[in-house]
């Protein structure tokens, strides 16, 4: 059990959470997660919440390998209308903004988001940690070598689990020094890691408990699944559920997914098994 302070609202958590992915982008790797206007985003948000999502993770910048970088200004143009609309129409919704720009994080929290999800762990925008500290919201700190444009050229590790854990420990320490109270660690499956490294990291995921923070896992429909099985991202729901189940058994606290209903079912079944 742990708690998260959502701008003064204390959220006590005693089970794994499900975070639904909504991308306001034209180029995210899974086409069914892409939306291009606030009304469609709201409809998807309502569907995910009805299926049991605890958090909605909304992003406007694709972070797939070698993706095109967009500016903070463009991210804000895409994000803010949807965050404002969802916050207005769905009271007490918990929105996470997926961005590595401090300005985007700040403006999104003002618009109604309650969590900042940064794939860079504060290494791209050096103002991010201080900004999040001042916002008084939880921060998801992820491992990624380099940037989305360079990460797949930097996937060299001595021991991938030890190296990822060491990086996260350093970044969590930096978060604490900046004044961030609630930190969530994400080992960054698929970010600068090949399939073998992802499987090794998943097999040893429970080692991340040494960080003493909740661990988020984002494996949904990623290439580790569809390349291993020789299928497509669109065909990867079953594989996603299998790996999410393993992650839960390895003490994952949050599942970040495209398919909420199936993830919620996995949480319920695994909870019966281990409780």
Image: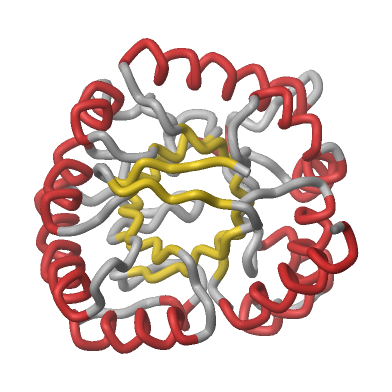
Horizontal and vertical percent for residue 229? Answer: 83, 72
Q: Name the side, left or right, on which 220 lies relative to 201.
A: left
Name the one closer to the observer, 103 or 66.
103
From what the image shows, is residue 190 above or below residue 147?
below
From what the image shows, is residue 144 above or below residue 203?
above
The residue most toward the top is 177
Quarter where residue 186 is shown: top right
Q: Residue at x 57, y 43 (%)?
A: 191
Horizontal and vertical percent for residue 260? Answer: 57, 77
Colouring rule applied to residues: secondary structure
Q: Residue at x 39, y 37 (%)?
A: 139
Name the one closer to the observer, 160 or 165.
165
Horizontal and vertical percent for residue 263? Answer: 66, 73
The quadrant in which the N terminus is found is top right
Q: Residue at x 42, y 87 (%)?
A: 47
Q: Name the side, left or right, on which 8 lies relative to 50.
A: left
Quarter where residue 27 is shown: bottom left
Q: Name the side, left or right, on which 249 lies relative to 48.
A: right
From what the image shows, is residue 54 above or below residue 16?
below
Q: How many marks?
A: 0
Name the one closer to the observer, 158 or 237.
237
The quadrant in which the C terminus is found is bottom right
Horizontal and vertical percent for residue 212? Answer: 64, 26
């Amino acid at each position: 059990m742990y708690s998260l302070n959502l701008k003064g609202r204390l959220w006590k958590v005693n089970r794994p959470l499900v975070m639904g992915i909504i991308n306001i982008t034209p180029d995210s790797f899974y086409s069914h997660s892409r939306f291009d206007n606030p009304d469609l985003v709201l409809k998807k948000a309502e569907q995910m919440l009805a299926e049991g999502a605890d958090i909605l993770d909304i992003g406007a910048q694709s972070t797939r390998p070698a993706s095109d970088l967009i500016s903070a200004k463009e991210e804000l143009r895409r994000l803010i209308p949807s965050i404002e609309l969802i916050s207005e129409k769905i009271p007490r919704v918990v929105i996470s903004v997926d961005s590595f720009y401090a300005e985007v994080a700040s403006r999104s929290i003002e618009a109604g988001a309650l969590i900042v999800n940064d794939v860079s762990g504060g290494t791209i925008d050096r103002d991010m940690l201080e900004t999040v500290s001042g916002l008084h919201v939880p921060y998801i700190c992820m491992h990624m070598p380099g940037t989305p444009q360079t990460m797949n050229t930097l996937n060299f590790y001595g021991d991938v689990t030890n190296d990822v854990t060491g990086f996260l420990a350093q970044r969590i320490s930096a978060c604490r020094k900046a004044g961030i109270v609630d930190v969530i660690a994400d080992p960054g499956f698929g970010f600068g890691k090949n399939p073998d490294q992802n499987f090794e990291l998943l097999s040893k995921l429970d080692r991340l408990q040494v960080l003493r923070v909740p661990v988020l896992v984002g494996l949904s429909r990623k290439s580790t699944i569809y390349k291993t099985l020789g299928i497509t991202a669109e065909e990867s729901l079953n594989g996603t559920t299998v790996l999410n189940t393993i992650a839960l058994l390895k003490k994952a606290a949050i599942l970040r997914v495209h398919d909420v209903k199936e993830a919620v079912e996995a949480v319920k079944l695994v909870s019966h098994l281990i409780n």
